[in-house]
Image (cartoon, helix red, strand yellow):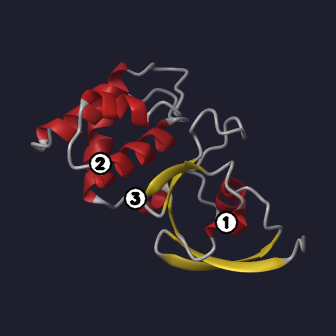
């Protein structure tokens, strides 16, 4: 496979064109080339969720996604979501519930929760827990994170 292929996609609303190795992980491109460091790289094997981004509306672990596979697609990172009203409410709830300690896993959790909120109209407690099954936190545990997610979801009248 040619290691200098060209392909384009949108990231945080901006069109980008990439020339290079099509098998390079999307997470590396986001962090190194675009300098969007909110996307963290923890395990490089899809186990921790720190690199979660939204790809065409769905949360994905970007360390497992070859950059060429996002051609003609829309990628949203935590930086791209930071001005969205739902995201701001989630950030406030995370802080209020003590859901952040070191902060390394936080962008992955928040990106996953944002995607869940955008894609579902009915929530059950199990939906939130199931959505977060691929996100790991080594500092705070999950109580505050789940409380923040439930606060944002349930206080807005979504049941």
Neighbour tally class for label 3: few under 14, some 14-19, many 20 plus, Cα within 10 Å: some
Is 32 located above or below residue 153 in the figure? below
Instruction: Place residue 73 in its image quadrant.
Output: bottom right
Q: Are marks 1 and 2 in contact (CB under 8 Å)?
A: no
Residue at the (67%, 65%) spot, across then down: 69
Neighbour tally class for label 1: few under 14, some 14-19, many 20 plus, Cα within 10 Å: some
Is 73 located above or below residue 98 in the figure? below
Q: According to the image, label 2 marks what residue?
A: 117
Q: Quadrant of the C terminus?
A: top left
Of mark 1 and mark 2, the one earlier in the sequence is 1
In front: 84, or 66?
66
Residue 85 image position (x, y, % from top left): 25, 57
Query: What is the C-alpha distance between the residues marked 1 and 2?
Result: 25 Å
Neighbour tally class for label 2: few under 14, some 14-19, many 20 plus, Cα within 10 Å: some
Of mark 1 and mark 3, the one earlier in the sequence is 1
Horizontal placement of 159 versus 68: left or right?
A: left
Residue at the (90%, 70%) spot, across then down: 1
In front: 13, or 121?
121
Query: What is the C-alpha distance between the residues marked 1 and 3?
Result: 22 Å
Residue 6 image position (x, y, % from top left): 76, 80
Q: According to the image, label 3 marks what residue?
A: 81
Of mark 2 and mark 3, the one earlier in the sequence is 3
Residue at the (71%, 38%) spot, across then down: 45
Tag 2, which secondary structure?
helix
Q: For residue 95, say whether it is visible.
A: no
Q: According to the image, label 1 marks what residue?
A: 69
Q: For residue 67, say whether it is visible.
A: yes
């Amino acid at each position: 496979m040619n290691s200098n292929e060209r392909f384009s996609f949108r990231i945080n609303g901006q069109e980008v064109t990439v020339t290079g190795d099509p098998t390079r992980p999307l997470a590396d491109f986001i962090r190194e080339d675009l300098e969007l460091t909110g996307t963290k790289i923890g395990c490089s094997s899809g186990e921790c969720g720190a690199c979660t981004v939204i790809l065409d509306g769905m949360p994905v672990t970007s360390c497992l996604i070859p950059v060429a596979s996002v051609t003609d697609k829309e990628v949203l990172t935590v930086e791209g979501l930071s001005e969205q009203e739902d995201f701001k409410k989630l950030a406030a709830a995370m802080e209020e519930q003590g859901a952040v300690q070191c902060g390394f896993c936080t962008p992955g959790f928040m990106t996953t929760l944002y995607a869940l909120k955008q894609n579902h109209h009915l929530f059950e407690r199990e939906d939130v827990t199931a959505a977060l099954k691929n996100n790991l936190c080594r500092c705070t545990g999950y109580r505050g994170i789940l409380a923040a997610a439930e606060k944002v979801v349930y206080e807005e009248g979504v049941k």
